Structures are given as C-alpha cells and as structure tokens.
Image (cartoon, grey):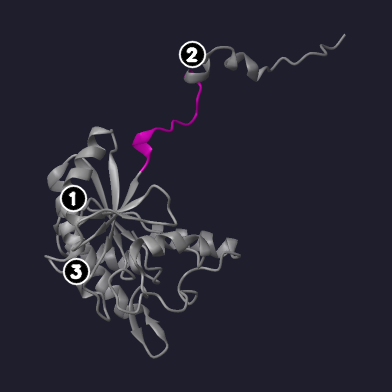
Amino acid sequence: MPNQFPSVRPRRLRRSQTLRDMFQETEFSLNDLVLPIFVEEEIDDFVPITSMPGVMRIPESKLAGEIERYARAGIKSVMAFGVSHHLDATGSDSWREDGLVSRMARICKDTAPEMIVMSDTCFCEYTSHGHCGVMHDHGVDNDATLINLGKQAVAAAAAGADFISPSAAMDGQVQAIRSALDAAGFIDTSIMAYSTKFASALYGPFREAGGSALKGDRKSYQMNPMNRREAIRESLLDEQEG
C-alpha cells in the first residue's frame, strides 16, 4: 500500500529556533543598512523635514556630533546629501575642494574613520535651476554633465568618501565616474549607482529634504515607472560600466 504521508517534510527544519537559525538563508541586520543624512550649510539649528516626520536637516556645524552618535549606536554607513546655499548654473560648488560635498565627506571620515561614507553624486541640490546637470536649449546636456560628475566624484573621493553614488540618471554616468576616479588614482573607491531611477512622485520628500529648486520635471532623463524591461537594462548597463 503506497504511503499516503509525505516523505519530504520541510517542517523538520523548523522545529526549534536553533534549527531555524541554522538553516536561515538570509541574514538582515544593522550592518546591511545605510543611513541617509541631509546636511545644510550656514545654519545653526536642526530643521525638520515636514514630509519625513522625525527626520531633520543637520547643520554642518553639528555633523561631527551626529556622526559620533550614529557610530555609538552601531550604524556602520551613512549617505550624505548636501543642502547648499551656493547655487549656480552648473552646481560647481559640488566639485570644489572646499565645497559642501568635500566638507561632508571629510567631517564624516575624520570623525569616524571606520564608518563607510557614501557620497550622493548629483547636481540638483547645487544648481540654481534644480535639474541634475548642465542645461542647454533642449534640456539637460548629458555629456557635459558626465564631465562634471567625474569632477564631483574625484572631489568626494579625495575628501574620504568610500562610495560614489551617482543619482543624476545620465547615460554613461558610471563609466564616466569610473574613468575619472581611476585617472585620479582612486582605483579602490567604489560606485553604488542609483541604477534604475524612476520619474516618480515618491521622490517628493527627498526633494524637500534636499531643498531642490526644480521647476518642471525630470522625465527626459529619469525612467518611466511603467517600463519593467528598461529598468533591468539600465541596471545591467551600470554593471557593465563599472
């Protein structure tokens, strides 16, 4: 008579917490998380971000104290977003040796050398028009922006950033940044790109947090959320570029 009961019983490995722990496939802990921080220059007090309850812009003058607090809490990594008061058409403050991008990375790394510092690499918080690159008559100039992304990446790496995190959504941005970093001697600086970045209303809170001056939209360079295959293609392209 055939056995009517299962011979393969996955529940055998779920009988106790010890067994469940032993055969758990995925671990998730504080070590896997990156804390985004929004740092504003030339202010004295923390500024609440209304669209992110409980989150505040950090005065640059208090950044070191916050990094010390995060390190004591066991946080291993931060991603720095700047809120600049020095805007121009190209976002040139972002690649200055004494600009906000460089100062943030330097403060974070000097305060907690063991902390992984990721530098958001874009221009929307540094341009007077709020777009993510150099503007021309027909919108954002992709290739002119690539040159400036490379300059910003090198400035951040020189200040101590461990990861460059390009979010400008320009074609070829990873390759341009990788080439600029390698040419400047930062061959060990890693890139974590926003590989598939959608033109989504969900970015609204981040734009408020970063004080973006954007008028219009970014649909000519950020992705259509309805395009699943294109999203995968974008991520694969970034991997190929380095």
The foreground one among 188 and 108 is 108
Q: Secondary structure at mark 3?
A: helix
Q: State the image coordinates of residue 149 (x, y, percent, origin top left).
A: 27, 69
In the displayed structure, 68 sits above or below 83; it is above
Rounded to the nearest whole Å, what is the CA distance between mark 3 and mark 2?
51 Å
Return the residue at label 2: 18
Q: Residues within 10 Å of mark 1 (few under 14, many from 20)?
A: some
Q: Is residue 190 magenta?
A: no
The range drawn in magenta is 22-33
- Which mark's residue is nearer the viewer, 3 or 1? 1
- The kind of residue tagged 1 is Lys
Q: Which residue is mark 1?
A: 62
Task: Report if the CB atoms under discs 3 and 2 are less than 8 Å apart.
Answer: no
In front: 147, or 179? 147
Residue 234 location (% of width, % of height): 47, 63
- Badge 3 vs badge 1, beta-carbon distance below 8 Å: no
Eye-nearest disc, 1 or 2: 1
Q: Is residue 220 left or right of residue 1?
A: left
Q: Nearer the viewer, residue 204 or 194?
A: 204
Which image quarter holds the N terminus? top right
Q: Secondary structure at mark 2?
A: helix
Crowd class of label 3 (few under 14; some 14 to 19; many from 20; radius 10 Å): many
Kindly report the distance in space between the C-alpha atoms of the residues bearing marks 1 and 2.
44 Å
**Image height of 200 relative to 145, above or below:** above
Q: Earlier in the sequence, mark 3 or mark 2?
A: 2
What is the chief secondary structure element of the magenta stretch?
loop
161 sits to left or right of 127: left
- Rendered location of residue 84, percent (x, y): 24, 67
- Measured in 3D between alpha carbons, the distance from the residue under mark 3 to the one under mark 1, in whole angstroms, is 22 Å
Question: Disc 3 marks which residue?
Answer: 95
Mark 1 / mark 2, whichever is N-terminal: 2
Residue 182 seen: no
